[in-house]
Image (tube, helix red, strand yellow):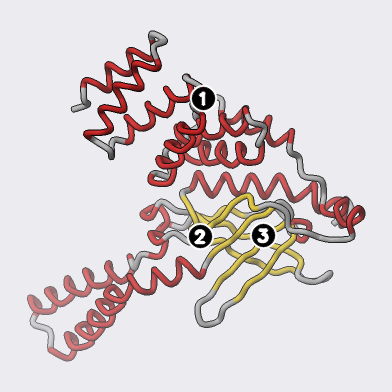
Amino acid sequence: MPDPRYEHAKTLRREGRAAEASSVLTALLAERPGDIGALYALAVCQIDMGERGHARENLRRIAGAHADHYGAHYQLGRLSQDEGDLRAAAVHYRQVLAVNDYADAAARLAQCERATAVPPVRKMIEQSYVADRGNLVHSLRLKARHILPLGSIAGVLLAFVAVRLLDTTGAGLEMAYPLVLIVLALLLNVALSPITIYIRTRMYTAQLYDYGMDVSAGVFRRSKQFVWYYQITEPPTYVRRPANYLTHTASLIVSYNDTAATTVRVQLRGFGSPRQVDQIRSYLQSRIPSERLPIRGPWT
């Protein structure tokens, strides 16, 4: 049940008494320091009172502990936008929209993107004779839930059912022994999965910059590839297989020219929810034409 002081503070703020609401919330947080709702409400009151530094600190605490708290990211985006840091604001608004179509976040993101439009890499090269990857826009990592050993778990359950059926039908032990070996192998895979998941989630990453993306993959056969957006030949392909519905993830497949005549594919596997993956797909799709046309021309 919510603390009545929390509701009292909300009422005070609605009446324009942000300082009194702030005092109530500060006392509440002294007793319940982990109350995220009270901390967020305090940050909003601090914004009302012009205490932007304290508000930003509290909002960052919330966003750091709860990455999907779109309210905190929205307020951080507005603070950054008001201070003229439109790139930082855009990052926060994208975080908001990856979770919820909240308030006017989409319109504010469009404003920030129009104001901070990135010139094509060709123009940068012509001006400075240097091809820089630009600022980091998104940092992606394979989600642990995407590679849960669901197949092994299902296999163990099916094997146990099969053993029971063999027992009831009186089948010979020659059928049971292979099943026991299979179950042991699957159980070993499940037992080792925390280690393999930990390693793989740190090996399969992608950093998206203004002008390209840096993709890392593999454990024993490690590969790192930087792909300029002008190399990408077509819009990224959104992929969601049946098992991904259980893990609430999706992937992207990106085709690019590794040479003038050949095309290869790179897969950004299970790095977020379907909504987050679609956000990244939209971002890449918006960057490809503006980069590819000045380099490749309209007919490639």
Quadrant housing residue 67:
top left
Q: How far is disc 2 from disc 3 in space, using C-alphas?
A: 13 Å
Q: Are marks 1 and 2 in contact (CB under 8 Å)?
A: no
Pointers 2 and 3 in contact (C-beta within 8 Å) = no
Circle count: 3
Q: Are marks 3 and 1 in contact (CB under 8 Å)?
A: no
Amino acid type, mark 3:
Met
User: Would you call the spot at circle 3 few (<14 residues within 10 Å), some (14-19), or many (20 or more)?
Assistant: many
Residue 177 position within the rendered picture, expressed as x and y whole percent measured from the top left: 18, 88
Specify the amino acid type for callout 1: Ala
Q: Real-space Cα distance between discs 3 and 1?
A: 30 Å
Instruction: Give the numbered dot on residue 154.
Output: none
Q: Residue furthest bottom?
A: 174
Residue highlighted by disc 1: 103
Report crowding for label 2: few under 14, some 14 to 19, many 20 or more residues within 10 A (C-alpha).
Answer: many
Decide if residue 2 is on the left or right side of residue 119: left
Residue 40 can be seen in this image: yes
* Residue 286 image-quadrant placement: top right
Task: Tell me where residue 293 appears, x and y as whole percent.
Answer: 85, 51
Q: Badge 1: how crowded within 10 Å, few (<14), some, or many (20+)?
A: few
Instruction: Pinpoint residue 271: horizontal percent, then vertical percent.
Output: 50, 56
Q: Is residue 219 above or below residue 58?
A: below
Task: Give x and y (percent) for residue 138.
Answer: 59, 51
Q: Which mark is residue 213?
A: 3
